[in-house]
Structure formats: structure tokens, C-alpha cells
Image (cartoon, rainbow, N blue to C red):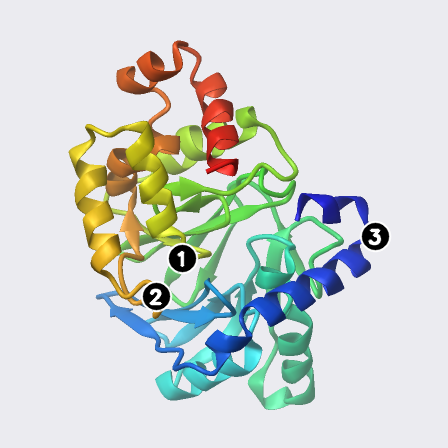
Amino acid sequence: MSLLSYLPHRISQRLTALYFTVSSFSLQRRPQTTQTNTMVGMTVTKIPALKDNFMYLIVCNKTREAAVVDPVAPDRVLEVVQEQNCKLNKLLTTHHHWDHAGGNEALYERFRQTPDWGELRVYGGQDDRIARLTHPVKQDDTFDIGSLRVRCLSTPCHTTSHICYYVESETERAVFTGDTLFLAGCGRFFEGTPDQMYEALIEKLSKLPDDTQVYCGHEYALQNLRFGHTIEPNNEDIRVMLERAQAADVEGRRALVPSTIELEKRINVFMRVQHPDMKAKFDTSNPVEIMGLLRAAKDKF
């Protein structure tokens, strides 16, 4: 995908769409089972898409207002909206890559053709590459989903305009991290630097409350945990989670996600760059340097 950054955006998006469509063709014929986490204040439904993507429907339990995160498969999203009898009026884009923002145009058009549904507000970082963006956001911008409060976290690195969305009810917290933070991993540094990923993971995401649920953009848990185990072979938390991942229905993507911030601090080597064991392994006390070395090693894993 890094080579695509040298092509005009429209061409790179079409090539990316073709790649994901072809690679996920066999999976599209299989049941795409959703998982719903019903809490006191909010309900989050994990909707598999393409080969290993996740879309998320966030519903305010009090008002039934809803937002969708990265709806690359709009028809499937609308099916789930109808099943849950909620009112979708917001689209949250984490970043411009086609497998996350590729459904924006079609979903926006469906709303335009159906006036009874009302306005669809499209949120995302300020970026011309995000289709139908109506509400550009930056660090610490806030908005509501019914009675839920959303705070935007700017996390450039995977892309320059990447946004994570931190959602709070009176009793629960969740963060939707796109391709910045994965379960036991992080995204490639396509448009950024180790310093930026350090700021995103350590200075921003790791400072969220420990019980914050982490909903990431892809199912990469097994590969990430295998890599983490090579870096920290004596980390018992990684070993236990790796055994869980190996036994899980990863292909059906029903297990493990969401994680929590507290868990990520224990099992995610990219969140552990300040740990003494990591400094000893890489023979440096500079956590930003460790971040870069980890990413380079993961890219070759």
C-alpha cells in the first residue's frame, strides 16, 4: 500500500478497492455474523466486512440515535440499523483508506435519496481524500450521539489525518481506533514517523481510563500476538492471550475484540516501549527509537 501513496488519490483508491474486493471474495460468501455488546448507556455492534475489517454501529440506548464507524459495506450497515430499530445520523471516518472510507459516498447518496432519514453527518480529519466529509474534526473536538459524548483524538502516522473516536456514556467508555491501535499491535507508519505513533499510543491512547474498551479496525490479533511473543517471550499475559487467539474463531472474527486500554498496556509491545524489558532488549533507553525498531521488525515478520 505504501507504493500507492505515489499515485493520484483516485487511482490509488480504485486499485485498493480492487485489491480488497478480490482478496475478500471467498469470505463474502460466508455468514458475516455480528457481535453486539449491550451496555447501560450504549450498544456497540461489531460488523465484519471484507477480508478482516470491522465496521461498528454505536447506539445511544436512551435516544436510539446511532453513528457508524468506517462503513465500507453500506448495505450491510443499513441491514443492522433496521434490525436494531435505531436512527443513524452520523458517520465517523477514522482515515481515508478505501477499506475504511470507501463506503462514504454510497451511504451518503442513500441518505440523499431518502429524505425521511434526515441528514447524514460525515466526520473525519481534515483531508480531501475522505469522500463526502461534512464535519472536519481535530484534536479534542467533541460532538454527541444522542446522550453519548464523543471526543476526537488526532493520531497521525498511519495516515496524516487519522482520527480515533473516544465515546463516553455516564457508565461506559469506548474508543474506536481504526488503524492506529490494534489488539496487540499498531498500524504501519505509511504517512508518519515513530515520534507520531509514540504520541498517539503513549501520550494519548494509553492515558485513557484503563477500562476503556478498544474497538480496532481489523482482526490482526493472532499475528500481532505471535510477533509480541517473539519480542517478550517471558510475558505471561501475551502467552495467555496468544493461546486464546489460537483457539478463537479468528476467521469468523467473533473473539477477542474489544480489548481494553488496561489489557493493551500488558500485551501490546507497541504500548510497552517504556518498559525496562523493552529497553534492555533493544539496548536503548529511547522509547521513540524502540517504537521505530519494533515497527521495522513487525513489517518483516
Other residues around mark 3 within 10 Å, as few (<14) / some (14–19) / many (≥20): few
Q: Residue at x 55, y 29 (%)?
A: 196
Q: Residue at x 44, y 12 (%)?
A: 286
Q: Circle 3 sits on which residue? A: 8
- In the rendered image, residue 268, in percent from the top left (x then y), is placed at 33, 37
Labelled pair 1, 2 in contact (Cβ < 8 Å): yes
- Seen in the picture, residue 21 relative to 184 is either above or below; the reply is below
299 or 263, which lies in front?
299
Of pointers 1 and 3, the one earlier in the residue sequence: 3
Labelled pair 1, 3 in contact (Cβ < 8 Å): no
- Quick one: SS at disc 2? loop
Task: Give the Cα separation between the discs numbered 1 and 3.
Answer: 29 Å
Q: Residue at x 55, y 66 (%)?
A: 91
The answer to whether residue 61 is visible is no
Q: Amino acid at mark 2?
A: Arg
Q: Amino acid at mark 1?
A: Glu
Q: Circle 2 sits on which residue? A: 253
Q: Amino acid at mark 3?
A: Pro
The residue at the far right in this view is 8
